[in-house]
Each structure stands twice: as C-alpha cells, then as structure tokens.
Image: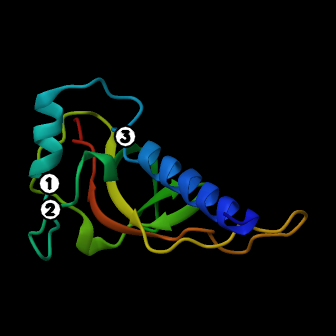
C-alpha cells in the first residue's frame, strides 16, 4: 500500500465520520419517538415529498427582513424561499424548524484566504415557522 492510498483512505474515513455526526438529531432535543414522528410528517409544500429526516431538520433562530424569513447556517445568511414555508403544520416547539441539505461540498479556504461565499451551500427543503402567540 502506498502513502497516497493511506492518506486518501484516511481522508475518506474522516469525511464519513463528519457526515455521520451531522446525521444526528438536533442537539437541543432529547430522543423522543413522538418528536421523530412529527419530523417525519413534514412534507415539502410544492411536491408533498418528505422534508427528509430528523437529521436534516434543525431548530433555528431566524429574523424577518423585508417580510422574508432569514436563517443563518454555518455563519452564512439564507433567505427562506416562500415556496418552502409550511403553514399547515402545527409547530408547538416555539422555535422555527428548517430542514435543509448541503447542495455541494467545496474546498476549505486556504490559510489566510477570505471566503466570499459559503463553502458548502445549502438547499432549504422546508421551513416551519413557530406558532405565533397572541
């Protein structure tokens, strides 16, 4: 086995370990079958396809700017497209829920470099605003 083969295999192992860690439920949740079932009922508004799984959904802080929801993922702001906002699901958590996937995986910025765009851009599949209280 060559040194290049070892480093390639090590790189793949690290990448898979990171992706497996990202597939965990949101960190501020306790394992709860009812919560998992709720996440699994989420559907994309336009296609009625699943919003993916609990591992793709996250409780998110948000702001409203110019009458649009905006979330921050990996330090980058994303405007939530109107067509992915789900208004037909009761969200009793008091927090917004965003389900998203990474669209691609980019190379890290070289040391000392300045990133002008997200390294790994996302695609928002579903957004469930918190239930408004009045």
The image position of residue 25, as x and y in percent, is 33, 38
Earlier-in-chain disc, 3 versus 1: 3
Q: Residue at x 67, y 59 (%)?
A: 6
Query: Which residue is labeled 3 in the image?
Result: 24
Question: Which quarter of the figure is the N terminus placed in?
Answer: bottom right
Q: How is the image coloured?
A: rainbow
Question: What residue appears at the point 50 percent right and 47 percent down from the top-left corner?
Answer: 17
Question: Toward the viewer: 32 or 70?
Answer: 32
Report how far apart the C-alphas of labels 3 and 1 lie in the structure.
18 Å
Q: Nearer the viewer, mark 3 or mark 1?
A: 3
First in residue order: circle 2 vs circle 3: 3
Distance between the alpha carbons at the discs numbered 2 and 3: 18 Å
Horizontally, residue 8 falls left or right of residue 97, namely: right
Q: Secondary structure at mark 3?
A: loop
- Please rate how many residues cluster around mark 2, counting C-alpha atoms within 10 Å: few if below 14, some from 14 to 19, many from 20: some
Residue 21's quadrant in the figure?
top left
As measured in the structure, the alpha-carbon distance from the residue carrying label 2 to the one carrying label 1 is 6 Å
Q: Is residue 17 left or right of residue 87?
A: right
x and y, in percent, of residue 54 in the image? 25, 46
For disc 2, the marked residue is 50
Instruction: Find residue 131 and report its horizontal and vertical position in percent.
Output: 21, 41
* Tag 2–tag 1 contact (CB < 8 Å): yes
From the image, tell me which residue sits under label 1.
42
| x and y percentages locating residue 130 in the rendered image | 27, 43
């Amino acid at each position: 086995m060559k040194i290049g083969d070892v480093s390639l295999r090590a790189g793949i192992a690290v990448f898979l370990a990171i992706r497996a860690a990202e597939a965990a439920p949101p960190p501020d949740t306790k394992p709860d079958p009812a919560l998992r079932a709720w996440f699994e009922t989420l559907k994309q508004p336009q296609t009625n396809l699943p919003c993916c799984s609990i591992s793709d959904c996250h409780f998110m802080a948000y702001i409203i700017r110019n009458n649009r929801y905006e979330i921050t993922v990996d330090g980058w702001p994303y405007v939530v497209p109107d067509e992915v906002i789900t208004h037909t699901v009761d969200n009793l958590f008091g927090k917004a829920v965003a389900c998203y996937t990474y669209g691609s995986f980019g190379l890290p910025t070289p040391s000392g470099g300045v990133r002008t765009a997200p390294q790994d851009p996302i695609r928002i599949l579903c957004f469930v605003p918190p239930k408004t209280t009045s």
